[in-house]
Amino acid sequence: MPFQYGEGEDVRLVVSFTNPETGRHYEAGWLGRILPLFSSIGECRARNSYEISLTDSPDGKDRGMINVPSVYFERASPERYERELRQGDRIRLRQAVQGDRESYEAGTLVTVLNTRVEDGIVRHDVAVDFSENLTVTRESLDDDRSGWATVEWSAGADPVIGFAADSPV
């Protein structure tokens, strides 16, 4: 079965953002559950935008519902689907990829920034160490993760990659 998000699936926001219409701020790391109230899960998949009920804050504040594209979140389950990648995973390119500034050889180490599923195709935005960001299909990446890193986003800037001290790469 191809990777796709399901109704009732627990997810984690991977980017912080402010809704321009409401001014409400949302933080990376907040948890929620895919809960389509105004459309079916099939419609969510078709438009790549999901209704998510956010988990209340530790002090009981209601964080409400959001409707966001899949690039804003990832699965929160400790188990992974076969070949599933998540933000911060370090992995090597399986094949050469042409970026905007240069070409990257197979074997180049990259960090996963986010994942999205569009038209049944899994795509990842990845950061090449000390260079540019690329968008690649899952098939462009090796099967085995090579380590992990933290990824922090700030408004209007490129993500900051923090390499874990205990990561093998």
Image: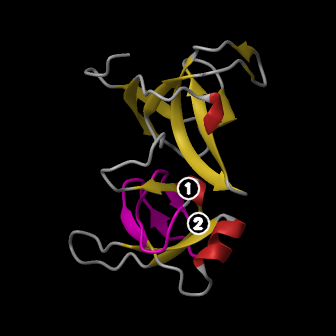
* Image side of residue 56 versus residue 118, left or right: left
Q: Is residue 109 above or below residue 55?
A: above
Residue at left 54%, top 62%? 18
Residue 38 is drawn in which quadrant?
Answer: bottom right
Question: Which secondary structure dominates the residues rendered in magenta?
Answer: loop
For mark 2, what is the residue? Answer: 68
The stretch drawn in magenta includes residue 22 = yes
Mark 2–mark 1 distance (CA, rounded to whole Å): 24 Å
Residue 133 is drawn in which quadrant?
Answer: top right
Mark 2 crowdedness (10 Å alpha carbons): few <14, some 14-19, many ≥20 = some
Q: Is residue 42 above or below residue 107?
A: below
Percent across and percent down for residue 57 are: 28, 70
Q: Is residue 93 above or below residue 2?
A: above
Q: Point out the frontmost of discs 2 and 1.
A: 1
SS at mark 1 in the image? loop
Residue at left 38%, top 75%? 63
* Image side of residue 117 versus residue 26, left or right: right
Q: Which residues are magenta?
A: 5-33
Residue 50 is drawn in which quadrant?
Answer: bottom right
Does residue 160 appear anywhere in the picture?
A: yes
Q: Which mark is residue 53?
A: none
Q: Which mark is residue 1?
A: 1
